[in-house]
Image: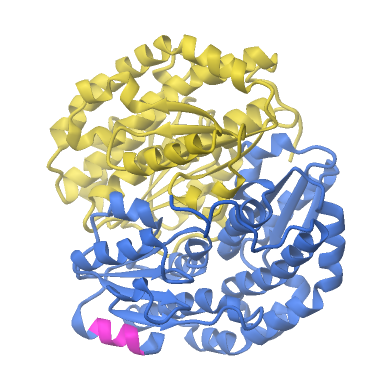
Chain colours: A blue, B yellow
């Protein structure tokens, strides 16, 4: 069932007052643009976002039949997220799950399942984010209404191809990045707006998990309230810049980084032509797509330069924990 | 005016449907236990939490006369938070501000100001957190009602003295921590539940800002979804353990850290007698108080061992940015 039909069917059963996004690691981060979209536009709906075990042990009080819980797990086997579906279902919530894996444990307690791509190409890796965002747009449009609904649909029609092309065009810059950053012991990552948790997943997944590089991450606006004291010549930062509402926050961080000669890699939505194909009214929400696709190529080149494949793990897939 | 009277007066003017917590750095983190309390207990109120400039540039749509915006800035001069008050006021929201500094710029657009202590002792540093939590409890109790209101009041009566005594009793363990961790290049910090953002402020303020030590922070439940691959013999972690609902999440992280001989410092609410004076129904919300107070002593000892005062800055207080 598509996002529009899923939301329609849920709204025929219950009024919806709350939406809760739940996942772990990159799957948690991939739900963030949808949360950000609702924060930016919903006048009444309450919106929250949790890592799965926090949701399980400290379940928010507003989870009931007036709540949609949207969960995601790439392989559909993340135990905490499978459990989150059971917790949500037991409270009477409507559970919508995103996974690439049909019939996986995640689908057991889900009322609705959306199967997305992943491995096919750079664009496919964005489908999880895209479906979550579509669910958010449908929920808003079918409850409170949303003035830029058509602009969003137009964006969804174009963003995958733009992201794929952007990734393919980024190889040269990515190789340069990899050469410059391959020997670093620690790399910080920051962003803002809809891209805030792309910075998060870049730090905890691409750097720490997949490259065993020390890393920290924070909102680019928070940089000035603690983290910036670490700034010095050659301290490495990755700044993911938005072409949209929160660009001044990202730009302020860049100005400071450059002023003190920090070693800075910038991936900027503005450089990939977002504004030429996406309406200004909705451009914020499509930055995470292009930036995620482009940075994937950066990560691939970093992995090559360090001779450390992105699939290499010490613990995951190897032992029980 | 006290939190109870402030909430009463606001509710006489408007129905309240939303509460938004806004601050930067440690002042953002200090508001988190109040957010967590409402997430855990509010059936209807929507609750959100932003760094100030994200609130300013990407103001959530639900900020209006049915919204309370609670802001905090220790000295009352943080420009982004001062601006947040103006943004909130322009949208018709009720603005309540917490600061130690009477007459500071933060108080200009605030409808209500609560002046809190800070420098007097370890307990005084917790007053900002305490007033925010009291506002949350009052708002819930005066709107939806709250079954454990008396237990919370009893907790507020006791938590400052317990926290002060806990801090004073922690000097020996703090010195041991400082000796063990003083030469580390990077230190990770994690927690969960109401203490989640105590880990955050410990990382971005105490480590990065005040000690110029590289640091990363994440929810203890997220540790298993990326960050744990960095775990190795002697990789340093600080784990802030809760005596409450999310303890199993913290304990699972500890088990893994110990299994792989990570260099781990634990500050545990259970070790300081929380459960002997706070009712079980509300114990979650008081963990951040005791743990913050105790870890302050750890930070003081770390600063001494590294001959790097907690007040030393490269950029803050020194230049415009």
Residue B255, placed above or below residue B128: below
Prevailing secondary structure of the magenta residues: helix
> Residue at the spot x=61%, y=15% of the render?
B179
**Closer to us: B267 or A321:** A321
Q: Position of residue A19 (x, y in %)?
A: 33, 67
Q: Position of residue A187 (x, y in %)?
A: 72, 47
Q: Position of residue A170 (x, y in %)?
A: 80, 73
Dividing the picture into quarters, in which one does residue A298 lie? Answer: bottom right
**Closer to us: A16 or A150:** A16
Dividing the picture into quarters, in which one does residue A193 lie? Answer: bottom right
Can you see residue A310? Answer: yes
**In the rendered view, does B142 fall on the left or right side of B251?**
left
| Magenta stretch, residue numbers | A5-11
Q: Is residue A10 magenta?
A: yes
> Residue at the spot x=79%, y=65% of the render?
A301
Which quadrant holds the C terminus of chain B?
top right
> Residue at the spot x=29%, y=22% of the render?
B159
Q: Position of residue B162 (x, y in %)?
A: 31, 17
Q: Is residue A270 magenta?
A: no
Residue A110, placed above or below residue B225: below
Residue A283, placed above or below residue B99: below
């Amino acid at each position: 069932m598509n996002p529009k039909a899923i939301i329609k069917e849920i709204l025929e059963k219950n009024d919806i007052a709350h939406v809760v996004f739940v996942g772990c690691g990159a799957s948690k981060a991939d739900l963030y643009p949808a949360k950000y979209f609702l924060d930016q536009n919903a006048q009444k709906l309450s919106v929250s976002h949790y890592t799965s075990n926090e949701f399980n042990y400290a379940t928010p009080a507003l989870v009931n039949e007036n709540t949609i819980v949207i969960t995601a797990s790439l392989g559909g086997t993340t135990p905490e997220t499978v459990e989150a579906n059971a917790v949500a279902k037991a409270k009477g919530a409507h559970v919508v799950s995103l996974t690439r894996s049909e019939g996986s444990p995640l689908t057991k307690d889900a009322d609705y399942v959306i199967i997305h791509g992943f491995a096919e190409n750079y664009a496919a890796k964005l489908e999880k984010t895209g479906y979550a965002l579509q669910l958010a747009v449908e929920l808003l449009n079918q409850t409170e209404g949303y003035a830029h609904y058509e602009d969003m649909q137009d964006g969804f029609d174009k963003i995958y191809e733009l992201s794929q092309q952007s990734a393919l065009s980024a190889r040269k810059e990515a190789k340069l990045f990899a050469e410059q950053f391959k020997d670093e012991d620690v790399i910080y990552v920051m962003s803002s707006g809809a891209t805030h948790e792309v910075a998060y997943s870049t730090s905890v997944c691409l750097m720490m998990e997949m490259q065993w590089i020390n890393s920290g991450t924070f909102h680019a606006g928070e940089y000035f309230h603690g983290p910036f004291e670490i700034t010095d010549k050659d301290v490495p930062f990755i700044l993911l810049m938005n072409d949209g509402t929160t660009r001044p926050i990202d730009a302020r961080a860049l100005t400071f980084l450059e002023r003190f000669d920090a070693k800075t890699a910038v991936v900027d939505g503005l450089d990939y032509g977002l504004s030429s194909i996406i309406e200004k009214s909705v451009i914020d929400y499509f930055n995470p797509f292009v930036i995620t696709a482009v940075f994937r190529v950066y990560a691939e080149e970093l992995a090559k330069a360090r001779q450390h494949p992105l699939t290499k793990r010490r613990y995951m897939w190897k032992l029980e924990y």
